Amino acid sequence: MRKRIEELAEGKIPYEQPQVIFSKEKLELEVVEGQTATDSFQIKSENGIRMRGMIYSSNIRMKCLTFQFEGEEADIQVQFRADGMSEGEIAVGELCVVCNGGEYQLSFAVTVTRLYAEASTGKIKNLRDFVKLAKSDWKEAYHIFHSPAFKNILAPKDLKASLLYEGLSKPSITEQTMDEFLIGIGKKERVRFLPEKHSVEVFEAAAPIEEQLLIQKEGWGFLEIRITASEEFIVPQKRYITDADFMGSTYPLSFYIDTEQMHAGNNFGCIYLENDVQKEEYQVWASADSIQVRKERTVQGLQRATYLLTKSYINFRLKKIVTGEWTKQTLALIQRMQEFQPNDPWYLLFQAYALQRNKQRQDAQWLMDEFRQKIKEKKTRSGHFTIICVCRRKKNRLW
């Protein structure tokens, strides 16, 4: 009893204290630069004795929204302000809890990051992540490219990518814009397309006929193709397709031969496949005649054109016509022969010869380059081609 009286005299008044426990050992937050982030934790009395206390922070940026608490349990809300902070900075400190159960310290660490876009694959933090997403899901990547958060993907030191994005995003951002951006920074190749074949011949066309052209694409990314026909008897089923229309790397383009729009004999036309950077041509040759009749007309047409070519050349050598007139007649006759044999590369060489004689050297050079490529594919050689090349280099007069 005496000991008890002495303790009371000294101010030592015994009472039961709550046994305080925390739901978290440490607070770890991630906050976007210039914004705020909130978090929470719980304080609980393990022995059921009511708690009463207050909380304050050692860091002025960390604010205790719940700075006082009372009861057996308490939910504490805190808020961190990242005004003026940049990505990579880390703020640390302690939350000091003073209550009837004692004094406690709960440490915290806040990491400042940028506003990165969230994708199905996770956060997109750099161009490597973005390119990976674009390969797997082009549409989702486009939504991110269109969002304000995309600028945060670009590294501050990557001035080229930043300027390219600024330039391409005005006045509007499209899928083509994103494709051009990735090409411009060297992260992908331009998507190209190619028809499986370059011509078709249709005979005995007595009624409308449906044909199909397979278009192959190479690469990944945005692709658009505008489809037009040079003649009314060719009717494409679609006038515009994109990469979304392809099944894998192939698209079957259907078109019709409208026999009511055809004239007697041979009908020549082209389907043009083009976009801003590429143009391909698909030649269509249709006739109501049989194959035998067509062959006979082809032979007759070639024979007559050859006769007229020979006659024109003789008149030229006899100086009955000037060089310009002979060149004009020759090019017209060769064009007519090309209609009968559209895939024969030798006509390119004949045209180059006529242009060379007329001193249209640049035009002749283009045709010779095209001829060189075609005979290279067929692994053949031309003595006539070699002679023209030699004469061009030495500026000799052709025969």
Image (cartoon, rainbow, N blue to C red):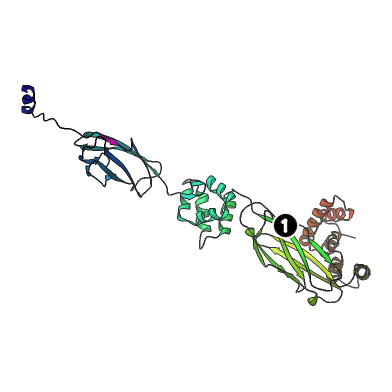
Q: Secondary structure at mark 1?
A: strand
Q: Please tell me whether residue 19 belongs to the stretch shown in magenta.
A: yes
Residue 62: tell me if it is visible: no
Which amino acid type is shown beneath numbered disc 1?
Leu
Q: Dot 1: within a 10 Å radius of its alpha carbon, few (fewer than 14), some, or many (20 or more) residues?
A: some
Residue 24 vs residue 80, the one in the foreground = 24
Note whether 77 is above or below 19 in the view shown: below
Q: Decide whether residue 121 is among the magenta residues.
A: no
- The residue tagged 1 is 194
- In which quarter of the view is residue 51 placed? top left
Left or right of 396 on screen, residue 85: left
Q: How many marks?
A: 1
Q: Is residue 88 above or below residue 148?
A: above
Residue 260 location, quadrant = bottom right
Which residue is depicted at the point 86% across and 53% down? 386
Q: Position of residue 290 (x, y in %)?
A: 90, 70
- What secondary structure prevails in the magenta region? loop
Image side of residue 48 versus residue 328, left or right? left
Q: Position of residue 158 (x, y in %)?
A: 50, 47
Seen from the viewer's position, the closer of residues 292 and 363 is 292
Magenta range: 15-24
